[in-house]
Image (spheres, grey):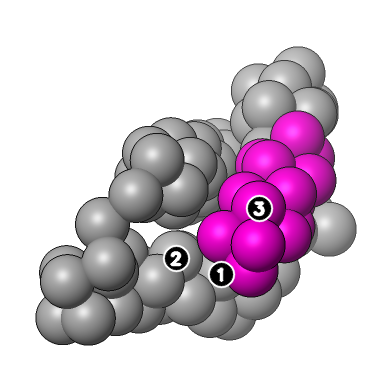
Amino acid sequence: MGEIFEAIMVICFGISWPVSIYKSVKSKTAKGKSLVFLICIFVGYMSGIVSKFVSGHITYVLFFYILNSVMVFVDLLIYFSNKKHDALNA
């Protein structure tokens, strides 16, 4: 039963990342984004993935951890691209 609630939590968090990526691409600026926040979230998802392997409790929830971490990584890449864009425009 706990696995279902974990999946709901990860899916709910995951819904926000496409929106964040879209806003990052559309705005073409890193202003308003927190690098520390993105890194903390990415490390959190990586920790969730590692915990699945360490505990040997690999379930379908792992897919959502991986999907979310990929989206956060993409948002991080866009952040650095936008940061460079901001520097060029300054």
Q: Residue at x 22, y 81 (%)?
A: 55
Q: Amino acid at mark 1?
A: Ile
**Which quarter of the figure has residue 15?**
top right
Amino acid type at image mark 2: Tyr
**x, y percentage for residue 41?**
56, 69
Q: Position of residue 52 (x, y in %)?
A: 28, 69
Q: Secondary structure at mark 1?
A: helix
Tell which circle, 2 or 3, labels the residue nearer the N-terminal end: 3
**Along the line of sight, the residue nearer the viewer: 48 or 33:** 48
Which mark's residue is nearer the viewer, 3 or 1?
Answer: 3
> In the image, what residue occupies the spot 72% across and 60% down?
5
The residue identified by callout 2 is: 45
Q: Is residue 77 left or right of residue 49?
A: right
Q: Which residues are magenta?
A: 1-16
Vertical order, 33 against 30 (above or below): below
For residue 28, which quarter of the picture? Answer: top right
* Residue at mark 1: 41
Residue 89 appears in the figure: no
Q: Which residue is mark 3?
A: 4
Which class describes the residues within 10 Å of circle 1: few (<14), some (14-19), or many (20+)?
Answer: some
Between residues 63 and 16, which one lies in front from this camera angle?
63
How many angstroms separate mark 1 from mark 2 (CA)? 6 Å
- Residue farthest along the front direction in this orientation: 1
Camera-nearest label, 1 or 2: 2
| Circle 1/circle 2 CB separation < 8 Å | yes
Residue 3 location, x and y as percent? 57, 60
Q: Is residue 44 visible?
A: yes
